[in-house]
Amino acid sequence: MRIGVDVGGTNTDAVAMSGNDVVGWAKATTTPEVTDGIVTAVQTLLGSHGLSPDTIGAVMIGTTHFTNALVEGRRLVPTAVVRLGLPATKGLPPFIDWPDRLRAVLGDHVYLCHGGHEFDGRLISPIDHEELRTAARDIASKGVGSVALASVFSPVDASFEAEAQEVLLDEVPGLDISLSSEIGRLGLLERENAAIVNACLRPLAERTVAGLTAALVQLGLDCPLHVSQNDGTLMSVDFARRYPVATFASGPTNSMRGAAFLSGIREGVVVDVGGTTSDVGVLVHGFPREASTAVSVAGVRTNFRMPDVLSLGLGGGSLVRPGNGQDDGVTVGPDSVGYELTERALVFGGEELTATDIATAAGMADIGDPSSVGVLDAEVVSGAVERMQDMLATAVEQMKTSADPVPVVVVGGGGVLVRDGLAGASDTIRPDHFSVASAIGAAIAQVGAETDRVYSMAAMTRDEAMAEARSVTAQRAVDTGADPATIEITDVDEIPLTYLPSHAIRIRVKAVGDLLTAATNGMSNRETGT
C-alpha cells in the first residue's frame, strides 16, 4: 500500500491506495510549516481507516513549497553565477531579465569566463582554470555558498561544466554547485535561469527534505519517500535535494495524472478547480501536455519541463458581486476568501457571497447550510452560474488544438462549480474521488527522465543519434529510481535545424518506468552484491 500527499495552498490531501484501489483519503488545513499539515493529514488518514504504518510501502508527496519560496522571494540564499562563454555572450549577462527584487535577494554576483561550445560541439574558446580559481576565491570572500554554472551549448557538450565544477571545488571545497546542463534545455538564458533558481533553493531543499523525512519518522512510517516532479513523474528525496526546481508546477501535474487515472481518459482536457484558482490543462497519452515555450515563474524565464497550464481566478472561495445595472453583470473572482472559506462563506455562517454559496443555491452542491442561501436573488444566482461556466468554457477552448468537442475531466475540491454539459465538451466527467485527484496523481506516479540535445549529422547518422538519445534517457530514468524492466519511451520529438550547417537535428526523448520497489531492489542488490 502507498500514500499520496498533495500540499496545496488551502488544503493538504492524503490518499491511501492499494494497487489501483483507493482505500481512503483525508484532508487537513495546509500550515506555514508544510510538514505539520502533512503529519495531520496522514495521521487522520491512518486513524480513520484503521491502517497500520507497517502496511505502507511508500509515500509520494507533491508540494508547492519551493515555488512559493521563489514567488515570495523568501528563504532564498545569495547565489553566484559562473558562465563559460567568453568572448561571446557579453551582450546578455546573467540576471539581465530578472525582477529587481529577486536580483537584490540573490546578490547579483556574476562571473563571465572563457569556454563554451558551438551547437555542433566546436570550441568557442579554451577553458581557463586560473580564471575560474580567481572567481572561486572572490565568491568565497563574499560568503556566497551557492553557485549556478552554465556553459554555452552545454546540453550538446557538458564537459566544460564538469571540468569547471572540479576546478571551483578544488579551490573552494564545499561550494554548492548547480549545473545548467542537468536542469534546463537548449537556450542559454533560460537554462542559466533555471540553474540559478535551483541553486538559490538548494539549502531550503535540504531543510525541507529533512523535515519530510522527520515527518515520516513521527508518523511511524519506515518506507521510501518520493517527491513529485513537474512532468507527472517521481524523484527520490536525494534527487529532490539536488534539484528542487523540478517540483515546480507539480500540483497541477498531479491533478491531471490523477484525472487520467480516475476517468480512464488519456486524450482530453482537465479542469482542476481549487479554492482560489482553476487550472486547465491537456492530457496527451495520459500525461500533461508540456509547454512548448519558455515558462515564466515569478517573473523569471525558464525552459525546464513544465506542463502547459492555463490558470484563471475561479475557485470555491471566489467572491461573487451582483451587477449594478443592465450592462454591469455579475462578477466572480478573481479575489477569493481562500482558506477562510469555512469562516466567511454564507453557507458556513459567514457574511461573504462566494462561488460555493452560488453552487449550493443553484442545487449544484450540498454544502454547509443550504437555507442560508435560499433567499438569494434568483437572477444573481443564475447570472453567477452562467458567468462561471463561461469562464471555464473559454479556458477550455483556449487550451484545445481544434474546434472539435473533447472530453473534459473535472477534479479538485471546487469541482462542484462545473455544470454538466460544459460548452466545448463532448462529455463532462466528474469521477469518483475527484476532490483528491492530485494526491491520487502523486500516489500512482511513475519515474521519468528526459533528454534534449542537438546532434550533428556530420559525426553520426540519424539512427545512431536517435538510439543514443533513447539509451541516455532510459539510463537517466533508471538513475532516478525506475525499474529497468519497465522503462518505456513515451515521447520522441525530432526537429531538423535546417538553418544550421552539418544537417543538425534536435532530439527530445522522454522515458518513464515504474518505481523500483523494495522487493525488486532487493533482488538487484543480492545479484550485484551491493
Image (tube, rainbow, N blue to C red):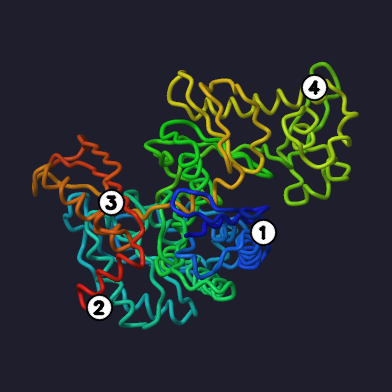
Q: Earlier in the sequence, mark 1 or mark 2?
A: 1
Q: Secondary structure at mark 1?
A: loop
Q: Quadrant of residue 472?
A: bottom left
Mark 4–mark 2 Cα distance, whole angstroms, equals: 71 Å
For disc 1, the marked residue is 30
- Camera-near label (3 vs 4) is 3
Q: Does residue 460 appear to the left or right of 257 in the view shown?
A: left
Mark 2–mark 3 Cα distance, whole angstroms, equals: 29 Å
Res 451 label: 3
- Camera-near label (4 vs 1) is 1
The disc labelled 4 sits on which kind of residue?
Answer: Asp
The disc labelled 3 sits on which kind of residue?
Answer: Thr
**Which image quadrant: the C terminus?**
bottom left
Q: Percent x, y for residue 124?
A: 21, 58
For disc 4, the marked residue is 328
The disc labelled 1 sits on which kind of residue?
Answer: Thr
For disc 2, the marked residue is 530
